[in-house]
Image (spheres, rainbow, N blue to C red):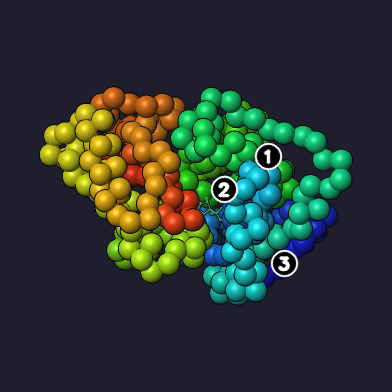
Amino acid sequence: MELFRTNAEINKWRDERWREGKTIGFVPTMGFLHRGHLALMEEAMRRSEQVVVSIFVNPTQFSPGEDLEQYPRDLDRDLKLCHELGVHVVFAPAVEEMYPPGFQTRVEVQHLTQHLCGLYRSDFFSGVTLVVTKLFCLVRPHLAFFGEKDFQQLVVVRRLSKDLNLGVEVIAHPTVRESDGLAMSSRNTYLSEEERRSALSLSLSLLEARKMVAEGELRADVLVQRAEMMIEAEPHTRIQYLQVVDEETMTDLTAVTPAAVMAMAVFVGQARLIDNMRLWPDSS
Ligand code: AMP
């Protein structure tokens, strides 16, 4: 496995692989890898001849007052995990390599970013679209793997790749969960034991909503109310948003359709956690 820190190194490697006609699969991450990331990497290994993982805590997607400084980092452990999985390249640039002095370009996806997380994290999506565009230009992958855990991000990135003709096929991977249902996240490390127990209410409320839909309840407000009640019954929780939206447009639904997703962002203690699930019976 090779570790690259500079654009020049990844450019050279990518040009060589393109000349050889190899399929390049790409998994962008912010590191502190967990089984969710590893599942994306395994799928990338299955579907591509060469796999690049990027590890970069991207400052442009954090707003002032968010957890950029505290965000957990452990590059040595991440490299070991990537190596064990058979990843070919880890690209871990310094902030100055990605954003050198004088940098001033932005990339904007307009409507999809005006919902859910976009309403509460003012810099998030413009930071994501910027870094993903840069990484796609550097790595020039054929396939890129994104988790459904961040499903709005997935939809935004898919739109971005299409709109800018980046030529990258964006592949979705289902959310990987702990055995009790909590969605895996690097931010789960912020949780105390008691908060960890409260955090379980996110996935439990999603499962409850799915069950209610299976039993015939299609009114979004009733489902939202029930989910809110379950989460608010737990200590240390504060709901930022909890909505039923259309998975293509991110707009609110009043009644559940086959495209309905329940999506939420909830503070549990200091940790802001997100989770989502499709509601239609038999959807995965
Ligand atoms: P992050 O390091 O949190 O920016 O995540 C990097 C990639 O891993 C993104 O595409 C995420 O959606 C994905 N990811 C994070 N957590 C999970 C999870 N629990 N299951 C599946 N994918 C995940």
Is residue 122 left or right of 172 when viewed as pictured? right
Q: Which callout, 3 or 1, points at the residue further toward the start of the chain? A: 3
> Which residue is painted at 30% across and 48% down in the image?
232
Mark 3 nearby-residue class (10 Å; few <14, some 14–19, many ≥20): some
Amino acid found under the numbered disc labelled 3? Leu
Q: Which callout, 2 or 3, points at the residue further toward the start of the chain? A: 3
Residue 47 in view: yes
Q: Quadrant of residue 164?
A: top right
For label 3, the residue is 3
Front tag of 3 and 1: 1
Q: Gap between marks 3 and 1, in whole Å?
A: 23 Å
For label 1, the residue is 130
x%, y% of residue 152?
A: 48, 38
Mark 1 nearby-residue class (10 Å; few <14, some 14–19, many ≥20): many
Is residue 92 left or right of 245 when viewed as pictured? right
x%, y% of residue 256?
A: 26, 30
> Which residue is painted at 22% across and 29% down in the image?
219
| In the image, farthest residue toward the right | 102
Tell me the element at label 3. strand
Q: Gap between marks 2 and 3, in whole Å?
A: 19 Å
Looking at the rendered structure, which numbered label has been put on residue 144? 2
Question: Is residue 114 positioned above or below 138 on the image?
Answer: above
